Image (cartoon, rainbow, N blue to C red):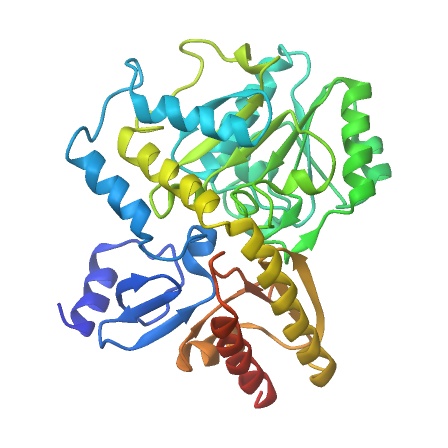
Amino acid sequence: MKLEEVFSSYKDYIMPTYTKTPVVFVKGKGSRLWDIHNRAYLDFFPGWGVGNLGHCHPKVMQAVRDQVSKLIFIPNNYYHLPQAKLAREIVYRAFPAKVFFCNSGAEANEAAIKFSRKFGKGARHEIISFENSFHGRTLAALAATGQKKYQEGFQPLPEGFKTVKFNDIEAVKKALTDKSIAIMLELIQGEGGINVADKEFVTALRRLCDEKGLLLIVDEVQTGVARTGKYFAYQHYGITPDIITLAKAIGGGLPIGVMVARKEIADTLGPGMHASTFGGGPVICRAALAVLKAIQKEKIPANVEKMSGYIFLKLNALKNKLPVIKEVRGLGLMIGVELSIAGSPIVEKCLQRGLLINCTHDNVLRLMPALNITKKEIDKAVDILADVLESS
C-alpha cells in the first residue's frame, strides 16, 4: 500500500479513537524505527512504555517463533508450561504471591478492583485513588482514574470510587469510611505528568492500610519491569503492596496484563469468579519469559541506573540553559520535562527531526526510552530536543 492508501483505509475502516500522527512505520529494531519511506527515527517513547527492550528484541522474537511452531493457544481450563514458568518468575522477582493473567493494564486493574470487592465481602467496596492518576479505559478502571477529561461522556461510571490529592496522607484519612476496602495508586503518575510519590507518603499509606485492614494496590503498568532501575517501582520504597498490576513492557510487544496478589489473600478469587480467555496464552508467556531473561542476562537494571544518571545530568544542564524548561523529574528512565509552553508543538518538531517523544498533561514532555539505551543515543536525542526548544 502507498502512503495515501494507508491514510484512506484508516479513515474509511477504523474508528477514529486515536489522534494520529501522519507517519507509517514498517520496521523497528532496538531504539530505531523506519517509516514507509525508509527514514529512520530514534524512538524515545517506544510503545507508550511497551518497549522496555526496544523493538523486536532478538530473544523475544526467537521465543515467539519457537512457541508458534509448537502450540499457539490452549484455554485456561488446561495446564501449559510457559504459564507455569512465567508465574513462578514474576513471583520470584516480586513477593510471595499468586498471579492472574489477562491482556492489558486496564484488565489487570479491573481484576484488582473485582478482587478488592470480593475481599470486602460486600460490606466494604470503596476504593480510594488519586488526582491525576490513570488506571485504564474500561469503566471501573476509568472510575478509578483521577482525571475528569477521560471520564467525560461515559457517565454514569461505577460507584464506589473516591479521588483525593496525591502525596497527601491527611486527604486519604479524611476519605476513609467503614466501606473503604483499598487504596490504589501509581508510584509515578505517567499520564498525570510524571509525578513521583514521596517515600514518606507511601510508607504512611502502607501503615494506614495495615491499621485499617485495607488493600494497597500499586499500579505498575508503566513503572514495572525495570523501568525505574528495579524490577518494580515499589522496591524503591521499602514496602510490599498487597496487589500489583503489570502490563505493557512485560510482553516485549505482545499484549499481556498481570495481577499479582499476596499469597495469604490470593485465593479470594476462586473458580468461575473471574476469567480471561486469552490471558496467559503460550505465545505471550514465552515472550514475557524472554523479556525477563533478557533483563537479567543483559544487566538491564544496572544500565538503567547508569543511563538515568547520565540523561538527568544532560537534561538538567539543558534546564539551566533554557528558561522554557521549568522542571526535570522522574525516576530511572521514566522522565518528565515540564515546560512553560505547550508541549505538543515540541513533539511535532522533534518528529520532523527524527525523534519520537510524547507530551502529557499539556506541557510535560515524557521520555521513556528503551532500557538498553546507550549514551550515544541519549546524546543524539538531547541534542535534537535542545535545538527544537531553542528555536521555539
In the depicted structure, whether residue 276 falls above or below residue 325: above
Where is residue 211? Give x, y as percent. Answer: 82, 20
Where is residue 88? Give x, y as percent. Answer: 45, 24
Where is residue 298? Give x, y as percent. Answer: 45, 50
Q: Which residue is drawn at the image coordinates 38% and 42% (left, top)?
A: 251
Q: Which residue is drawn at the image coordinates 15% and 72% (left, top)?
A: 2
**Along the horizontal axis of the image, is 360 left or right of 201?**
left
Extreme right residue here? 170
In the depicted structure, whether residue 366 falls above or below residue 172: below
Of residues 20 and 76, the one nearer the viewer is 76
Q: Quadrant of residue 181?
A: top right
Q: Which residue is drawn at the image coordinates 65% and 14% (left, top)?
A: 120
Extreme bottom residue here? 391
In the depicted structure, whether residue 41 falls above or below residue 67: below
Q: Which residue is drawn at the image coordinates 41% and 71% (left, top)?
A: 42
- Image quarter hosting the N terminus: bottom left
Q: Quadrant of residue 250?
A: top left
Is residue 189 in sight in this rendering? yes
